[in-house]
Image (spheres, rainbow, N blue to C red):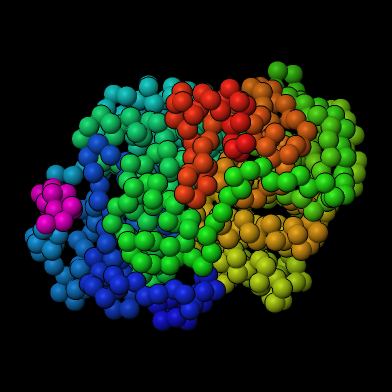
């Protein structure tokens, strides 16, 4: 190890990771001798949305407990912990002074949206209406329910909600509160792009009312970019120490994060930059056909959801991205291909072995991760498997844990590993980005791509994170229609045509950041937005 990480360097880049200067100062909080230390704190600002960008396990929750007044930061003096007056002295003259003074005086009220919404049913008995009524402190509940389209599930038991519904209910419950400080730990898992943008707008609206501060942790960079006014990058060694930088402009913060180098901090956080294709990737013309499928239709019954799929081909060795709103039939299509559902019309009798990772992961056997994975592949533990699967998915340090004890992000990584470890003709991954932090998304993306190339595998990926889709997919399949009623799936097409079709359905255009070429969502009705819509170029520049 390089001396700062407690385990193997996550970036295989020991020589170029320099020791952060912050570590020479006292931390804001240290849990004990040789325990996790947090350096710096995010600065909530009234009337603003402050973003935090960084991996899990880096101290975000610790920081929020301090800002919520639940934890007096010990400034590294865990043997003789200071009180709030000492802490205030320490922060005098900094941007946090007024905020800490208010915390000391008990003047800060806090509303929170937890990271793992899947845990809510275990903590609450009752229906959606009962949950939301308890949090309706501003009298704005009806508005939130309407904007987030929660109406249809108001009388449903919380136990029966899907992950996407739970996410919207949890966000509405947080935003309905009357607080000075709102903390939302991830807003996008299980939501489609339209829903992500609606939530981002609602958070901004609440901030713009004036004196409330919003703090948001988010790993979907396109949404974070749209949502935040300022950004703290968090870095370090998960479980060992975390550094929260001073606030940066959102544009610079994301650009520096992608480039792998934080300028003010003179800190390299990743050996290589993450780069996007400004122009549509070149067509892959040489690939063989893995399977051709005919027109398919499927209905769940009279008056129930129905899906029509245009016949098309899936190519050997490609990563085919699948995009479209929630409730439009993407999982239904996956199940048809996997043979777990029979089509009403169209014969899908092509005897393909399909490995499928569903959106909502259900791996709850009382079994250790290593035992579970070795039951799937006899490659388990081989140097190939370790390099291609275990390392990029950061499985080493959870191998000995029980499946039942895993967090959402850990469960996701195990499920992706399990699916890719199966021997199959076609790998189907439904929302692999959910609950992965931004660094894990980057690593998972390259693991999936490399796996497709090296194993001659064909991978279908359903996801709503546009950055991940851009980095991952060779071609796109676009679903549209009326969610929960009728869905239509077009043929797989080249990235440019696919992005244009998908984004024109959503009426969203992207521009390119001048410095690093990353895509940024245009303000609706801005000059660029109107021009690009006129030209029919929603994503890639010409
Ligand atoms: P994040 O929210 O970024 O995932 P946390 O703030 O929850 O990170 O945790 C950061 C680190 O601090 C973790 O390694 C966690 O195990 C450790 N930690 C959290 N609470 C305590 C505690 N009360 N005592 C000791 N270590 C803790
Ligand atoms: P997506 O994956 O695009 O979110 P799905 O294929 O999961 O969409 O679902 C499409 C629609 O079909 C949704 O309205 C869903 O509630 C409905 N649906 C899914 N499974 C069934 C089923 N077994 N019976 C009746 N309706 C279903």
Q: Quadrant of residue 373?
A: bottom right
Decide if residue 230 is on the left or right side of residue 456.
left
The image position of residue 3, as x and y in percent, is 41, 81
**Closer-to-camera residue (451/136):** 451
The image shows residue 3, relative to residue 512, as above or below, that is below
In this picture, residue 247 sits left or right of residue 124? left
Residue 104 lies within the magenta run: yes
Q: Is residue 239 visible?
A: no
Residue positioned most to the top: 303
- Residue 168 drawn at (x, y percent): 46, 35
Report the residue at 37% width, 56% height from top. 233
Q: Residue at x 74, y 57 (%)?
A: 452
What secondary structure is the magenta-colored segment mainly? helix
Q: Is residue 250 left or right of residue 361?
A: left
Please give left or right for residue 210 compared with residue 328 in the image.
left
Viewer-nearest residue: 241 or 422 = 241
Q: Which residue is at the front of the view, 276 or 351?
A: 276
Q: Quadrant of the C terminus?
A: top right
Residue 79 in the image: above or below residue 313 = below
Q: Is residue 429 magenta?
A: no
| Span shown in magenta | 93-105
Foreground of the two, 157 or 166: 166
Q: Residue 180 at x, y = what percent?
A: 22, 39
Q: Residue 41: percent from the left, percent from the top?
A: 27, 58
Q: Residue at x 66, y 23 (%)?
A: 481
């Amino acid at each position: 190890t390089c001396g700062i990480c407690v385990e193997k360097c996550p970036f295989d880049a020991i020589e170029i990771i320099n020791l952060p200067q912050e570590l020479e100062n006292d931390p804001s909080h240290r849990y004990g001798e040789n325990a996790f230390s947090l350096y710096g704190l995010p600065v909530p600002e009234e009337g603003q949305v402050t973003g935090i960008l960084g991996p899990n396990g880096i101290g975000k929750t610790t920081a929020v407990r301090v800002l919520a007044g639940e934890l007096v930061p010990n400034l590294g003096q865990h043997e003789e912990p200071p009180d709030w007056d000492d802490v205030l002295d320490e922060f005098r003259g900094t941007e946090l002074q007024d905020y800490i003074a208010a915390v000391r005086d008990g003047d800060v009220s806090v509303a929170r949206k937890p990271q793992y919404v899947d845990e809510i049913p275990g903590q609450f008995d009752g229906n959606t209406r009962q949950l939301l009524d308890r949090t309706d402190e501003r009298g704005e509940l009806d508005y939130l329910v309407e904007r987030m389209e929660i109406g249809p599930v108001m009388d449903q038991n919380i136990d029966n909600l899907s992950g996407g519904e739970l996410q919207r209910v949890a966000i509405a419950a947080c935003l309905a509160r009357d607080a000075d400080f709102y903390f939302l730990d991830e807003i996008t898992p299980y939501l489609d792009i339209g829903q992500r943008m609606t939530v981002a707008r609602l958070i901004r609206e609440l901030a713009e009312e004036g004196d409330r501060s919003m703090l948001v942790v988010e790993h979907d960079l396109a949404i974070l970019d749209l949502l935040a006014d300022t950004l703290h990058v968090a870095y370090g060694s998960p479980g060992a120490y975390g550094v929260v930088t001073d606030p940066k402009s959102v544009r610079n913060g994301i650009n520096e994060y992608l480039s792998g180098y934080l300028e003010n901090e003179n800190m390299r956080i990743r050996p290589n930059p993450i780069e996007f294709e400004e122009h549509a990737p070149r067509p892959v013309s040489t690939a063989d056909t893995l399977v051709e499928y005919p027109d398919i239709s499927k209905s769940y019954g009279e008056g129930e959801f129905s899906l029509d799929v245009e016949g098309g081909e899936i190519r050997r060795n490609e990563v085919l991205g699948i995009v479209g709103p929630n409730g439009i039939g993407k999982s239904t299509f996956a199940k048809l291909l996997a043979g777990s559902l029979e089509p009403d019309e169209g014969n899908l009798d092509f005897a393909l072995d399909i490995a499928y990772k569903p959106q909502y992961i259900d791996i709850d056997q009382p079994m250790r991760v290593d035992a579970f994975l070795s039951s799937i592949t006899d490659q388990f533990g081989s140097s190939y498997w370790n390099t291609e699967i275990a390392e990029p998915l950061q499985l080493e340090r959870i191998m000995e844990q029980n499946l039942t004890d895993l967090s959402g992000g850990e469960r996701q990584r195990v499920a992706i590993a399990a699916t890719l470890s199966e021997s199959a003709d076609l790998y189907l991954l439904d929302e692999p980005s959910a609950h992965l932090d931004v660094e894990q998304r980057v690593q998972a993306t390259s693991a999936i791509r490399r796996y497709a190339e090296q194993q001659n595998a064909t991978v279908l990926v359903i996801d709503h994170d546009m950055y991940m889709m851009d980095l991952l997919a060779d071609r796109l399949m676009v679903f549209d229609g009326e969610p929960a009623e009728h869905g239509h799936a077009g043929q797989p097409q080249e990235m440019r045509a696919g992005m244009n079709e998908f984004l024109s359905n959503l009426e969203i255009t992207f521009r390119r950041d001048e410095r690093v070429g990353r895509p940024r969502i245009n303000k609706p009705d801005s000059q660029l937005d109107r021009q690009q819509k006129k030209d029919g170029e929603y994503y890639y520049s010409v």
